[in-house]
Amino acid sequence: MANQIIFTKEAPAPIGPYSQAVLSGNTLYVSGQIALDAETGDLINENITEETHAVMKNLEAVLRAAGFSFSNVVKCTIFIKSMDAFGTINEAYGQYFKSNPPARETVEVSKLPKNVNVEISCIAVK
């Protein structure tokens, strides 16, 4: 079975040698998204809440391009610059998973692409 590369202009173009997502069978692997505006390429990072919502909207755009939604997500990985922001990120993130939230880990890292504060990837299954 051939893998299908997913790309949408509704989410930021990759900034390296990777795909926005890869569909393999009925499983979608979505690359980490950061808070880049898809149209302008500008960072959306006035505050951590706004930044997290921008990341989630980018994830949603990639999911939608493959015919998936947040209800199909089974696992997320959240990379954050500081665990001090955990509560605020969690509050914004939780708005996208009102019931039956996916499995998840949250990891503090020393640096993220473009010096953002949060990056989130996910795996979804139909």
Image (spheres, rainbow, N blue to C red):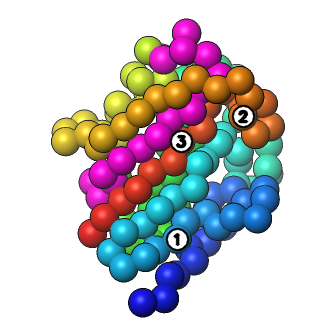
User: For the view shown, which residue lies furthest in the bottom direction?
Assistant: 1
Q: Is residue 113 magenta?
A: no
Q: Local crowd at mark 2 within 10 Å, few (<14), some, or many (≥20)?
A: some
- Above or below residue 73? Residue 91 is above
For this rendering, which residue is in front, 8 or 40?
8
**Which labelled disc corresponds to residue 22?**
1
Q: Which residue is mark 3?
A: 120
Q: Quadrant of residue 55?
A: top right
Residue drawn where x is 51% and y is 58% of the image: 30
Which element is circle 3 on? strand
Residue drawn where x is 60% and y is 47% of the image: 33
- Above or below residue 118? Residue 39 is below
Q: Amino acid at mark 3?
A: Ile
Magenta residues, as a range? 71-86
Q: Which residue is mark 2?
A: 112
Q: Quadrant of the N terminus?
A: bottom left
Q: Quadrant of the C terminus?
A: bottom left
Q: What whole-number distance in Å separates the C-alpha atoms at marks 1 and 2?
A: 22 Å
User: For the view shown, which residue lies furthest in the left direction?
Assistant: 100
Q: What whole-number distance in Å separates the C-alpha atoms at marks 3 and 1?
A: 16 Å
Residue drawn where x is 66% and y is 40% of the image: 35
Q: Is residue 77 magenta?
A: yes
For this rendering, which residue is in front, 115 or 24?
24
Which element is circle 1 on? strand
Q: Amino acid at mark 2?
A: Leu
Residue drawn where x is 61% and y is 72% of the image: 7
**Which labelled disc corresponds to residue 53?**
none
Q: Is residue 86 visible?
A: yes
Q: Are marks 3 and 1 in contact (CB under 8 Å)?
A: no
Q: Is residue 109 left or right of residue 126?
A: right
Q: Amino acid at mark 1?
A: Val
